[in-house]
Image (spheres, helix red, strand yellow):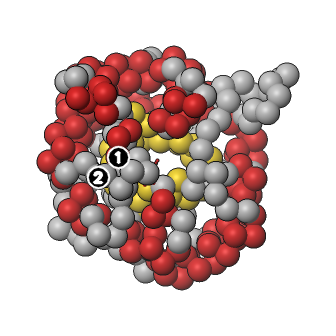
Amino acid sequence: MRKPLIAANWKMYKTISEADDFVKQFVPLVKDVTDVDKLIAPPFTSLNAVATAAAGSGIIVAAQDVFYEEQGAFTGEISPGMIKDAGGTFVIIGHSERRQYFHETDSIVNKKSKAALRAGLGVVLCIGETLEERNTNRTFDVVKRQIAEGLAEFCEAEFKDTVIAYEPVWAIGTGVTATPEQAEEAHGFIRSIIKEIYGDLADEMRILYGGSVKPENVDEIMASPNVDGALVGGASLDPQVFSKLVKFRRG
Ligand code: PGA
């Protein structure tokens, strides 16, 4: 049984005090929901504040990126150990905004993932095609390459601490959501690719959907058998709205 995971990606939003306020409002709203894992990924500056405010709540605290070296002359970068030190236990890697604006390649994504897992962090590895790739029938090729290269040389233990987030780039922040059929088709394909590489471990891997998930569409998206959760941007910034996503209707 795969436990659903609903994850908030705050991107470059919220000061420390705003992050603290959010958690203080959010924790009581979801305290009775024990059959869903909840994750919050604030900006680095609020990581420790969120970890402190969420202590004892069971909420997973994640960073939105990480560098693959443990320390050194890498101005502006943050290491896996620093994330752990700040109270994070997970990290989002390879988000399409990182790939698009910061030129992250599959090989960088793989190095970051391996470094994070080596340090004992869980990983949410993001994949997904652009509109142009979908319109030219390359969705499956792109997703297959991102999985094969992103997960390259993962051992079984590393694989177990990894969650995949399928986020079609054309659905992120656009208000356009993949239909449940499109999401299920992609998620089923992703699981089949993982199965080819890792066998039955694929059945345990959580695959999240991301891209304009909101209270109005979360139930139908979560009803797809291969969708195990959501990675949410815009609708994760308000504690009331995000709590509605955590309380999606169980099938
Ligand atoms: P969105 O972002 O929910 O605002 O579309 C999702 C994401 O980028 O993870």
Left or right of 211, for residue 106:
right
Query: Do the numbered discs 1 and 2 sit on residues whose CB atoms are within 8 Å?
Result: yes
- Residue nearer the viewer, 227 or 139: 139
Identify the image quadrant of residue 48: bottom right
Q: Position of residue 155 (x, y in %)?
A: 44, 24
Can you identify the residue that label 2 sits on?
177
Identify the image quadrant of residue 218: bottom left
Q: Height in image: 226 above or below 3?
A: above
First reached walking from the N terminus: tag 1 or tag 2 = 1
SS for callout 2:
loop
- Residue 171 bears which disc, if any? 1
Q: Position of residue 4 (x, y in %)?
A: 34, 58
Q: Height in image: 99 above or below 223?
A: above
Mark 1 C-beta closer than 8 Å to ligand 1: yes
Query: Badge 2: how crowded within 10 Å, few (<14), some, or many (20+)?
Result: many
- Residue nearer the viewer, 134 or 141: 134
Q: Position of residue 87 (x, y in %)?
A: 70, 54
Q: Residue at x 45, y 73 (%)?
A: 241
Q: Amino acid at mark 2?
A: Thr
Mark 2 C-beta closer than 8 Å to ligand 1: no
Q: Count the marks.
A: 2
Q: Residue at x 71, y 49 (%)?
A: 44
Q: Amino acid at mark 1?
A: Ala
Q: Height in image: 77 above or below 105?
A: below
Query: Does the image show residue 5?
Result: no
Q: Residue at x 76, y 47 (%)?
A: 85
